Each structure stands twice: as structure tokens, then as C-alpha cells.
């Protein structure tokens, strides 16, 4: 497969239209077969459920070129399962998980020329999403839906290396207890936009959201889960029913325990104990781990011992091991890598 004439090293984290995308429509209680199409436009009613009442959800995953030249995806079955949970919570029809994974495979194959070469630092980002497409004026679920997948080549999240960031403790709540914080609904991200823009305007890279009930426990940021390392090298992640179950976080915990021999804990993490941790990071699909160097709590600075120059040593090992698994230089656990071609 001849690659597209793209300067892979110059890619940012943005949208570039590729050749094919997958589209399937839900009507009269069933999904159609779906097609791969050249048409990148979406045509819906002005009264569509997604426009009136934000009935939509999405996922994000990547395709990579491995060291031995294969194109692969990382744990797409877990993305399919998480989207199933999102659909059920939003009263949307579930696109069958086996067909979901196959659609990802088909779209990546159709856009193989856009999968960046190994060693470029770039990847093919895959965005599956679903929305209510039929007209809805009363507050109720739509009757028709569209499921789509598009791809776009993206550069490394960190150009020039992952430098520790500064975040603030937010006064705004991200999600309500027993609400929708645990699913990947578009509405959750829309609600976070004001707060992340405000953080950037005030010199911070991200927000640390606390539990809205007591405002004493760490939850997550607008788009990533927290990962902490104690001074005795225990890897700790916050546990809460209102944070998104990150596939990257789940994978990092497994890597910490099974590959690096570290103790792991998934538990409630109190803001008061954050200053006692040795390292802190934000984990997610885009960056794998973004190291945190400083947390500002209303003027009080919590400076992580790992510093503001490099990733902490345990965070670095976690990052290197997981990216090694994804890129094929380290043997993956069974079922983690979906070979596309």
C-alpha cells in the first residue's frame, strides 16, 4: 500500500479528511447493513434529536503501524463495549459490538494509505459516533439514528517530548452523582468547554474536577483519568461511579502490575493526600500519559516531586511499556492487539 504524500512529522492533532467513512442508519427498529462512502457530509433534519436534545455519543481509538509493518488497533472491543453502555444510558439503539469492531477494521483498511509509518510518532485517529437523526420536538428519544466512523491522521500529542503540565482545582463540577459522567456522551464535553477555556486563559493546562457531593475527592479532568504514584511506587487511580472508565487507565494498571511488578490500587483519592504522591499523570487515548508537575488549589501550589522538566520515573516506565505494546516492540497480552493488515 503506497502511503499518501503527507509530511508525517509535521502533523498536528487536528482533522484531515480521508477517503472513506462508514455509515449505518437505524430505522423501523433495525440497523441497515451500512456502507463505506466517499461523502464526508452529514445531512439531517433541522429538528433532529441530536440538534434539539444533544442525543449523541462517541468513542476514540487509534490505528498504528507496528515495528514489523502491520496495521493494528488497540483493544477496540473495549471501545465497542463502552459505546454500548453510552447508548443504553442515552436511550439509543446499540450497534452490535461485533459489527462495531468489524466496521472499524473496514474503515481503517479503506484508509490504509493514511496510516502513518512506524517511527513517525503519528497515528490514525478513529472516531466512531452516533446521534439521533429523526425529527424530535417533544422531549423524548429520536426514532431514527445514524452511526458513523471517520478517520484522520494525527501527529504525536506531545511534539518535542511530554513536559509536565500545570492544572488547577476546579470550582465547576464536571458531572452529577448518578448522572452521565461515566459515559462518553457529547453533552458531557460541551459542558466542560467553558471551564477549559477559562483555565487556559488563566495560565493552566487543565482542570482537576472533584466529586460534586463533598468536593473532597479527586475525580478526573475534562477528558482524561488521573493516575498517581506513591513514594513507595504504588500506582493509584481514583475510583468513582461518575468518571469515565478509561481503557488507557485500565491497560496501564495491568501493565503496572503484570509487566512492572508494581502494586496497584483503584480507590477513592482525597484531595488532601495528593501532596503526598510522588508522581501524577493524566491518562487517555490521545497522549497515553500527560505528566502533571504542579496542581494549584486556589492559590496553594502542590508541586509534585517528579518536577516540571520530565516524566517521573514510574510514569515513564508505564508510558514506554504501554506504547511498546501498542507499537509491537513488546509482546502484548492476549486479545489486546487487533491486526488489521
Image (cartoon, rainbow, N blue to C red):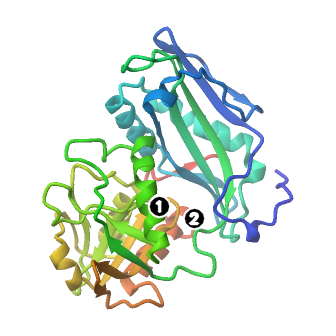
Which residue is outermost to the left?
A: 214
Give yes or no for contact between labels 1 and 2 (Cβ–Cβ under 8 Å).
yes
* Dot 2: element: loop
Left or right of 201? Residue 32 is right
125 w.r.t. 305: above or below: above
Disc 1: which residue: 332
Query: In the depicted view, which residue is nearer to us: 147 or 118?
Result: 147
Q: Residues within 10 Å of mark 2 (few under 14, many from 20)?
A: many
Q: How many marks on residues?
A: 2
* Dot 1: element: loop
Q: Residues within 10 Å of mark 1 (few under 14, many from 20)?
A: some
Dividing the picture into quarters, in which one does residue 110 lie?
Answer: top right
Dividing the picture into quarters, in which one does residue 318 lie?
Answer: bottom left
Q: CA distance from mark 1 to mark 2?
A: 8 Å
Left or right of 36? Residue 82 is left
Residue 138, position as x, y percentages in the image: 39, 17
Residue 236, position as x, y percentages in the image: 24, 71
Amino acid at each position: 500500500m503506497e502511503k499518501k504524500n503527507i509530511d508525517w512529522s509535521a502533523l498536528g492533532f487536528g482533522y484531515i479528511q480521508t477517503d472513506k467513512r462508514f455509515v449505518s442508519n437505524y430505522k423501523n427498529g433495525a440497523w441497515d447493513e451500512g456502507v463505506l462512502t466517499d461523502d464526508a457530509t452529514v445531512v439531517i433534519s433541522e429538528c433532529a434529536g441530536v440538534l434539539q436534545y444533544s442525543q449523541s455519543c462517541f468513542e476514540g481509538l487509534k490505528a498504528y503501524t507496528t515495528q514489523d509493518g502491520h496495521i493494528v488497533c488497540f483493544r477496540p472491543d473495549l471501545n465497542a463495549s463502552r459505546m454500548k453502555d453510552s447508548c443504553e444510558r442515552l436511550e439509543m439503539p446499540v450497534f452490535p459490538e461485533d459489527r462495531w469492531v468489524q466496521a472499524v477494521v473496514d474503515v481503517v483498511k479503506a484508509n490504509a494509505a493514511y496510516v502513518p509509518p512506524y517511527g513517525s510518532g503519528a497515528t490514525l485517529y478513529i472516531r466512531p459516533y452516533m446521534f439521533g437523526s429523526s425529527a424530535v420536538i417533544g422531549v423524548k428519544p429520536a426514532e431514527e439514528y445514524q452511526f458513523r466512523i471517520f478517520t484522520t491522521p494525527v501527529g504525536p500529542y506531545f511534539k518535542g517530548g511530554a513536559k509536565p503540565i500545570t492544572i488547577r482545582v476546579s470550582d465547576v463540577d464536571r458531572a452529577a452523582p448518578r448522572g452521565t459522567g461515566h459515559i462518553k456522551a457529547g453533552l458531557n464535553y460541551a459542558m466542560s468547554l467553558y471551564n477549559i477555556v477559562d483555565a487556559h486563559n488563566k495560565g493552566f493546562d487543565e482542570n482537576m474536577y472533584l466529586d460534586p457531593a463533598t468536593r473532597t475527592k479527586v475525580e478526573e479532568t475534562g477528558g482524561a483519568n488521573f493516575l498517581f504514584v506513591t513514594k513507595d511506587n504504588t500506582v493509584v487511580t481514583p475510583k468513582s461511579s461518575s468518571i469515565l472508565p478509561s481503557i488507557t487507565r485500565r491497560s496501564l494498571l495491568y501493565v503496572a502490575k503484570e509487566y512492572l511488578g508494581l502494586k496497584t490500587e483503584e480507590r477513592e483519592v482525597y484531595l488532601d493526600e495528593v501532596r503526598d504522591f510522588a508522581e501524577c499523570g493524566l491518562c487517555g487515548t490521545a497522549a497515553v500519559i500527560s505528566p502533571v508537575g504542579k496542581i494549584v488549589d486556589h492559590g496553594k501550589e502542590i508541586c509534585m516531586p517528579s518536577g516540571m522538566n520530565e516524566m517521573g520515573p514510574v510514569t515513564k516506565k508505564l508510558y514506554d511499556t504501554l506504547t511498546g505494546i501498542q507499537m509491537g516492540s513488546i509482546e502484548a497480552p492476549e486479545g489486546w492487539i487487533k491486526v488489521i493488515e
